[in-house]
Image (tube, helix red, strand yellow):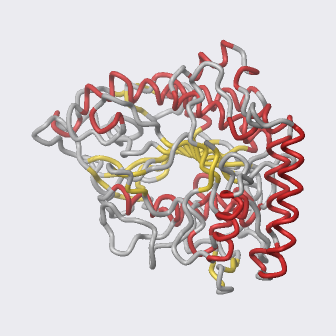
Amino acid sequence: MLSILDCSPGSRPAVGSRRELLRVGGLAFGGLSLPGLLGNRPVTHAAPEPGLATSFGRAKSVIVMFLGGGPPQHESWDPKPEAPPEIRGGFGSIDSATPGLRVGELMPLTATLTDQIAVLRAMVTNDNAHSSSGYQMMTGVPHVPLSQENAVSKAPNLAPHWGALAKYLKRRGGGVGFPPAITLPNRIANVGEIVWPGQNGGVLGPQYDPWLLTCDPSKPGFQVPDLALPGELSAVRWDGRLKLREQVNAQLDRLQEAASVRGFDRQTQQALDLLGGGRARAAFDLSLESAATRERYGQTRWAQSVLLARRLVEAGVSLVQINWANIEGEPNAGSWDTHDRHNDLLKRFLMPWMDRAYSALLTDLAERGLLDETLVLWVGEFGHTPKFNANAGRDHWGHCFSIALAGGGIRGGVVHGKSDGQAAFPVSGRVEPRDLHATVFHCLGFPPDTELSDSEGRPHPLSRGRVIGEIL
């Protein structure tokens, strides 16, 4: 289902009331939350810092591979072959395409592509809870308080998701009807569907929420049902609904003149364009890909979502976040939250699925001439503890972990930052999520001091971080 993430507290009731009226009247068009599609606020920013101009604005789009549960630094980008077994773990390390860089042995495909990748080995949130550390990674703002599990979107933790920021800043699509930011194939939530904060527009307002596309592109005949008219809805009935909508709008416009409502017709039209646009439907049609390409990514729900993300940025979407898809029947729902059976889960499916899809994405983008203009992030909410626990697992660790960036202005074959002998704490090159955000938006063409206005008209800087020039 194509939908908008739940509105944050404080959203204007007038917009919600209008949307509810249209839904009751059968005019919400298959679950599209229409008022949140577009907005119009001023954006001001200065020129990029000297020395960073060549990478400034190189990226047209961003793909975020979010490995929910936390990918372990020891078995991926920061192996410690000289450490004792209780730190080193059960796997070795292998050479990569970057001289001097060794990666975990479960990343053989990725290892051949590190000349395109910049690795950050000293990322720090100092937060050991999934939801609050994830909030910091996706917003660049620390949660208050830190290490707060089962946190939800409420003040003061209403910083906007990086997709919401991209939507605010770019406000463009690759064609009629495309939203600037999309999240797929599911939202991120703790057990009990406790949705993490930091996945919506926050203080910018619900009109900047990324589109949440809950889907399984690996299913045979996959299509997005909201991009086609229901089979039982004839063209005559459709025209009738549009006329009824116009009548409802005419009445409501006399009652509600708020700015957020005045933009409703324009937002509704974009939804209708998306519903009726052949190009939009084609972007979601994975049957247009060759069998070899689909196989290269892998046939899992997550892997096919990665392929779909490539098609969406190719069509002009500014930011796509692919969340790790849960796997029924596996411990911790098949996430990277490996508190037990760590080695087994990594070897059996976590690392092979990731390695295959990640390497396929970078290769695919490069072959299509898109990697130079597409920034790809390999991230999670944190890493894992240096030592194994009593259940043969690694626990949460936000004090030092690894992430990777490629394309879109990033200098490949670079390792920035160094951890200690246990990959427990930074030794040098420490970076925080706010620095990652500053770097991402620098590559998109917006310096950290870009000024944004929230839903109450208050100014905010785009980021309080530092652009990581060492990887540009």
Rendering quarter of residue 466: bottom right
Question: Horizontal placement of 350 versus 297: left or right?
Answer: left
Residue 156: where, in percent of width, then height? Answer: 45, 79
How many numbered badges does the structure rendering display? 0
Residue 445: where, in percent of width, then height? Answer: 75, 61
Residue 216: where, in percent of width, then height? Answer: 56, 31
Rendering quarter of residue 342: top left
Seen at 84% across and 35% down, the residue is 234
Seen at 37% across and 46% down, the residue is 70
In the image as oriented, which residue stretches furthest toward the top?
292
Is residue 186 in view?
yes
In the image as oriented, which residue stretches furthest toward the left?
390
Quadrant of the frame with the N terminus: top right
In front of the other: 408 or 115: 408
Question: Horizontal placement of 318 versus 13: left or right?
Answer: right
Question: Horizontal placement of 318 versus 137: left or right?
Answer: right
Residue 412: where, in percent of width, then height? Answer: 61, 41
Is residue 418 in view?
no
In front of the other: 442 or 178: 178
Seen at 15% across and 37% down, the residue is 86
Seen at 69% across and 77% down, the residue is 452
Q: Where 319 falls versus 457 (above or below)?
A: above
In front of the other: 358 or 401: 358
In front of the other: 24 or 364: 24
Q: Where 163 falls versus 232 (above or below)?
A: below
